[in-house]
Image (tube, rainbow, N blue to C red):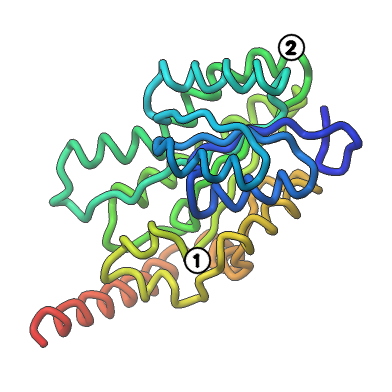
Amino acid sequence: MPTPTSPTPLRAVVTGAGRGIGAAIAAKLAAEGAQVVVSDIDPATVADVATAIGGYAVPADATSPAEIEHLLAAATDHLGDIDAYFGNAGIIGGGGLESSDAEWGRTLDVNVMAHVRVARLLMPGWVRRGHGRFVVTASAAGLLSMIGDAPYSVSKHAAVAFAEWLSITYGDKGIVVQALCPQGVQTAMLDAAGDLRDLLASQGALTPREVADCVWEGLQDDRFLILPHPQVADFYRYRAADTDGWLRGMRKLQSGWEARRGHATTS
């Protein structure tokens, strides 16, 4: 399989590539010599990205089985084959228990089932070839949690779990599976987080380009977890070593957030 440092260009597909992290990953891959197919639900933004990086645009809705089949077929026709797939499409959820079934369904569909549908199509061929790379953009919320947004937190946990399952099942068959788990990143999604924005950015909000650089570094050694915010690894270890202590700390964060929300509402 072409590797990030191989003289043979890496042939990659990046979804959610119209802006933010996905666009930055696509740009980084192209800058490093990869052949890149970019996809997004917004045809205009993904066309702009393709033009900027010398890639090939295939608009698609990551939740549509038919459109995903079309994306992979078009990418294969353009590239000759697909060596790496970067599943970056994602949305925030809603809120807590008041989130509707529709909000839960949409969040799970985009943040989890989109990966499942693609893996169903890619894995058989990759196993026959003996190589492939599947990179899931999850979140630090998938390793830890996220207060205020149950659908997002649960779906990102599920995305990490699915990536783990893929790695366990296919890792000895030549397939590299990785999970990208950033914390705050300067994207439209962070801006849409409302009164959670400051909390999510409290450890430092990276630029999409900085995240893409971390992804490229992660491709060099095939590590499962790609953590642009190094402190997430410490939090993750603490969570495993002292889950009750970690939960107490999270409840303090929850209480502080609720207090700030109440102040903002009444002031």
Relative to residue 15, is residue 135 drawn left or right?
A: right
State whether residue 122 is above or below residue 49: above
Amino acid type assigned to the residue bearing label 2 in the image = Arg
- On the question of residue 163 being in view, the answer is no
Outermost residue, right side: 7
Q: What's the residue at 15%, 42% (across, down)?
A: 100
Q: Position of residue 87 (x, y in %)?
A: 54, 37
Dot 1 corresponds to which residue? Answer: 242
Q: Position of residue 84 (x, y in %)?
A: 68, 32
Q: Secondary structure at mark 2?
A: helix
Dot 2 corresponds to which residue? Answer: 128
Q: What's the residue at 75%, 54% (across, down)?
A: 217
Label whose residue precedes the other's in the sequence (2 or 1): 2
State whether residue 21 is above or below residue 260: above
Amino acid type assigned to the residue bearing label 1 in the image = Asp
Q: Position of residue 72 (x, y in %)?
A: 56, 20
State whether residue 19 is above or below residue 262: above
